[in-house]
Image: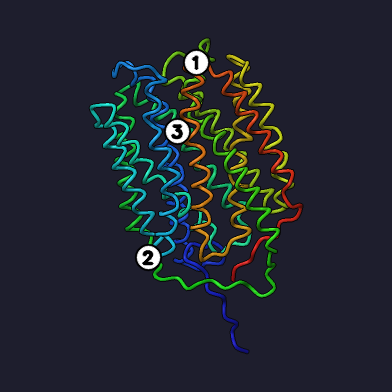
Amino acid sequence: MSRPQTPALSWDTVESFPGDKLDQSRISQLFLNIGHALDHLFMLIFPTVVIAMAPEFGRSYSEMLPLSLGAFIMFGACSLPAGWLADRWSRRGMMALFFIGIGAASVLTGLAQSTWQIAAGLTLVGVFGAIYHPVGIAMLVSGRTKVGRVLGVNGVYGNFGLAFAAVVAGALAYWVHWRAAFIVPGLISIALGVGFMLLVPDPGKQSRPQRAAGAPLHTRAVLLRVFGILLVTTLCGGIIFNATTVAMPKVFDERLAALVNTTLGIGVLISIVYTIAAMAQLIVGYFLDRFPIKTVFVPIVALQAPLLILAGSTENYAMLAVALAMMFFIFGQVPINDAMVAAYTDEHWRARALAVRYVVSFGASAAAVPLIALMHRYSGDFRYLFFVLGAVACIMFVAAVLMPVQVQKTAVA
């Protein structure tokens, strides 16, 4: 009896890899997960240390924060060309460029001598940071029919990046200088980029995957409905996610005055909140592999609006508790949107599909920066910011309710 042939798997698929191929897959997945952590860490260094930077440059918080606007705009706008290059050229090459490029941009920001140089450096951070999500997520879900667990684990790493941004940047700014908060992580990222090129092999040209026999095909009406819902939830979710994570250091600085009064203390508290909230993505990933997306999606977004509104009027221990619950459900939504893309796209253009999603998400999230500055400048606090975000969450809830009941995932051979 002839031995049955096993189907060819993509280089970054974890399941069923024998021997050294399995090791290579695990190594590449580890680098991709670390890359997600770094991506969010670099984007939140400035919002953490801007409190310490403002006196040196003689400007207020509301005047300094908009210097990061270019970074958030590029973080979204450059996702599309990054995804296109990854599909047309090399995903591995783009990831190497991500590690080295974002590290170098962070070092340049740490060496800046004027506000325009800071703005330029942060913009470069956004340009290279845009590479990760369309490329790294596409590599992670390549060849998988169940993506919940892998997206959940990857999301936890991303949230650890958010958490460590606050504590690492806060500690370096407190014990050394705010410049060290940019330079030290930048050098580490460059070193990781070199390690990525040495340890992760080039898979070569990949053949276009074929749809497995019997794989479900979605009607045009269903696809239009799902991607319309994805558009709305991505827009709303991007604004909420970015506004809460960018504003959180200053919110804690104002609302937790009885608990902390240093950048290090604020960073530690934020890290605790984000680390605990990160577990939401593991839980959501578990349920995504076992239930229809709508079943998981609706309760996650339903609880965001009341928590955001409640955050507008609480202080000290109450604020800390509300922030933890609020970020738990905000973080928990992230793998759901990526799972929707994976469920309805083919492998050969998935990086571009994810790029479109992140252009919308991070493009919308860029609006959070002027929104935060505007609300803080004219009201003196963040009360109305949270009320606005609560209204945005209500819109997102309506879109989630309209999601098709059963989402069938497209199988790839």
For disc 3, the marked residue is 164
Q: Which is nearer the N-term, disc 1 or disc 2?
A: 2
Task: From the viewer's side, name the closer residue of 333 and 7.
Answer: 333
For disc 1, the marked residue is 378
Is 157 above or below relative to 145?
A: above
| Res 205 visible | yes
User: Callout 1: 10 Å neighbours few (<14), some, many (20+)?
Assistant: few
Residue 278 x/y as whole percent? 57, 37
Task: From the viewer's side, name the closer residue of 93 and 269.
Answer: 93
99 relative position to 342: left or right: left
For the residues labelled 1 and 3, the Cα–Cα distance comes to: 31 Å
Please tell me which residue is depicted at 44% across the width and 63% down the height of the picture.
Answer: 87
For disc 2, the marked residue is 202
User: Element under label 2?
Assistant: loop
Task: Specify the amino acid type for callout 2.
Answer: Asp
Please tell me which residue is depicted at 58% across the width and 14% down the height of the picture.
Answer: 316
* Front position among marks 1 and 2: 1
129 relative position to 406: left or right: left
